[in-house]
């Protein structure tokens, strides 16, 4: 199966400028493809996995990925897919975000070997160009009519409340110039991007044709929403970040575990390197077993955060199903039990478990606590408590300062020292 056919079968292909010609071009290894990443935050998010994995798939087929981080375009903002203009960023903010994103992308593409990926920053070639030079060398090749015909521009012009600034209107020319520069300096003839980038990509192809008389190609991937219609990569209104300090590996893992059954097969094809045959086998399992979701969460968490973080996330997830609570951090326990009652105790001296249960609200009295323990339904860190005179000591903590009480199968209480 050739690369474009594979991308199509995985649901990762939206459109191609000239598929027959591009198929033939890609039959020879060593071609370059670039995709731009927006440095408006200091981390990529779950939606960035689609372009990152597209670069990875090209590299695995022997082609060279070029990661373009928009140090200059990030200071303007792309109007595509937006109803209002982004706040302008300072050069210092952009530089810090560029470096953070570059580090994250090393998880997806290799910067070593024959077809090693490279990272470029379009600030390096746009900053030295004067406004007059840009108008003369680039602007003269585009009519205003051509630019107004692009959907991203037309949609904003129709919005009387926000409109479009001249800076954003110029974004198309800057992205076209990026393609020209990468064509000249790195022999890059393919640009990838989301379906909302089609107008910008074709503008670059047109500029290369007019100035260099050469053929170039565009490949776009679909912009994702979940089966329920929600924006992909959001959870309770928050973005799912690839930075573990913004979205912990446990939260990241849980996002994928909670994938809707209707999305499981699609996401396995898009976000993993599992064969299509294996994905079909996974999705043939009974839905209640959630086998596809578990494999999806494991594959993506390993890719983004590594094996150790995956093991910790899986261990944390098992806690909710009675797994032993040990070796976790305060942050992990706080995330796992974010929605359960919590209470405080002073462990400068051992505390009777019955007293802790009353303080937690797990029992109305010490007598009731004693009866619950005698009935075998009380657990400390998911280990059954055998006697009513049991005490909680410092060594019973499951993390730095926390322990977990469970009454029955599902009633949890988080103790904080």
Image (cartoon, grey):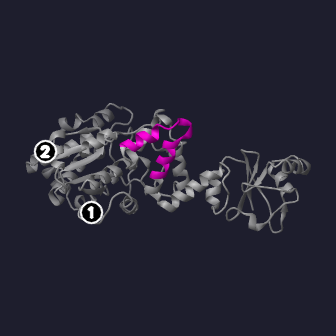
The residue range painted magenta reads 276-299
Task: Identify the residue shown where x is 20% and y is 51%.
Answer: 179
Q: Main secondary structure of the magenta part?
A: helix
Mark 1 vs mark 2, CA separation in Å: 33 Å
Q: In the rendered view of the protein, which quadrant contains the N terminus?
A: top left
Task: Identify the residue shown where x is 25% and y is 46%.
Answer: 3
- Magenta segment: does it hold 159? no
Q: How crowded is mark 2: few (under 14 residues within 10 Å), some or many (20 or more)?
A: some
Lateral position of residue 324 relative to residue 257, left or right: right
Counting residues from the N terminus, which is met first, the one under dot 1 or under dot 2? 1
Q: In the rendered view of the protein, which quadrant contains the C terminus?
A: bottom right
Q: Which mark is residue 116?
A: 1
Residue furthest out toward the right: 367
**Total number of numbered labels?**
2
- Magenta segment: does it hold 297? yes
| Disc 2 target residue | 141
- State the residue in front, 45 or 354: 354
Q: How crowded is mark 1: few (under 14 residues within 10 Å), some or many (20 or more)?
A: some
Place of residue 148 in the rendered image (x, y in percent of width and height, measured from the top left) = 23, 35
Q: In which quarter of the image is residue 394?
A: bottom right
Place of residue 230 in the rendered image (x, y in percent of width and height, measured from the top left) = 47, 36
Q: Are marks 1 and 2 in contact (CB under 8 Å)?
A: no
């Amino acid at each position: 199966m050739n690369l474009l056919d594979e991308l199509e079968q995985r649901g990762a292909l939206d459109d191609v400028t000239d598929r027959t010609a591009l198929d033939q071009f890609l039959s020879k290894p060593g071609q370059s493809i670039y995709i731009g990443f927006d440095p408006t935050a200091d981390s990529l998010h779950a939606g960035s996995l689609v372009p990152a994995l597209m670069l990875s798939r090209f590299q695995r087929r022997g082609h060279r990925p070029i990661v373009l981080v928009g140090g200059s375009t990030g200071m303007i903002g792309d109007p595509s897919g937006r109803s209002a203009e982004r706040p302008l960023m300072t050069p210092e903010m952009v530089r810090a975000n560029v470096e953070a994103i570059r580090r994250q992308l090393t998880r997806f593409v290799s910067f070593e070997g024959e077809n090693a990926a490279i990272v470029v920053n379009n600030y390096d070639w746009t900053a030295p160009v004067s406004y007059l030079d840009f108008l003369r060398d680039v602007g003269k090749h585009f009519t205003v009519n051509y630019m107004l015909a692009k959907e991203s521009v037309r949609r904003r012009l129709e919005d009387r409340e926000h409109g479009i600034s001249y800076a954003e209107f110029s974004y198309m020319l800057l992205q076209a110039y990026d393609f020209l520069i990468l064509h000249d300096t790195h022999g890059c003839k393919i640009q990838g991007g989301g379906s909302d980038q089609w107008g910008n990509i074709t503008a670059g192809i047109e500029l290369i044709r007019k100035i260099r008389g050469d053929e170039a190609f565009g490949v776009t991937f679909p912009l994702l929403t979940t089966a329920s219609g929600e924006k992909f990569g959001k959870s309770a209104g928050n973005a799912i970040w690839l930075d573990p300090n913004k979205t912990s590996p446990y939260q990241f893992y849980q996002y994928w575990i909670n994938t809707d059954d209707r999305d499981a097969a699609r996401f396995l094809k898009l976000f993993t390197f599992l064969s299509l045959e294996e994905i079909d086998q996974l999705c043939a399992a009974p839905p209640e077993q959630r086998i596809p979701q578990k494999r999806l969460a494991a594959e993506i968490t390993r890719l983004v955060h590594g094996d150790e973080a995956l093991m910790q996330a899986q261990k944390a997830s098992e806690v909710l199903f009675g797994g032993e609570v040990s070796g976790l951090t305060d942050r992990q326990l706080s995330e796992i039990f974010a929605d359960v009652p919590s209470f405080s105790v002073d462990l400068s001296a051992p505390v009777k478990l019955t007293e802790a249960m009353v303080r937690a609200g797990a029992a109305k009295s010490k007598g009731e606590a004693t009866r619950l323990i005698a009935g075998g339904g009380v657990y400390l860190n998911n280990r059954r408590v055998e006697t009513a005179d049991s005490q909680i000591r410092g060594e019973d903590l499951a993390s730095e300062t926390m322990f977990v009480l469970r009454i029955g199968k599902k009633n949890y209480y988080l103790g904080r020292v």
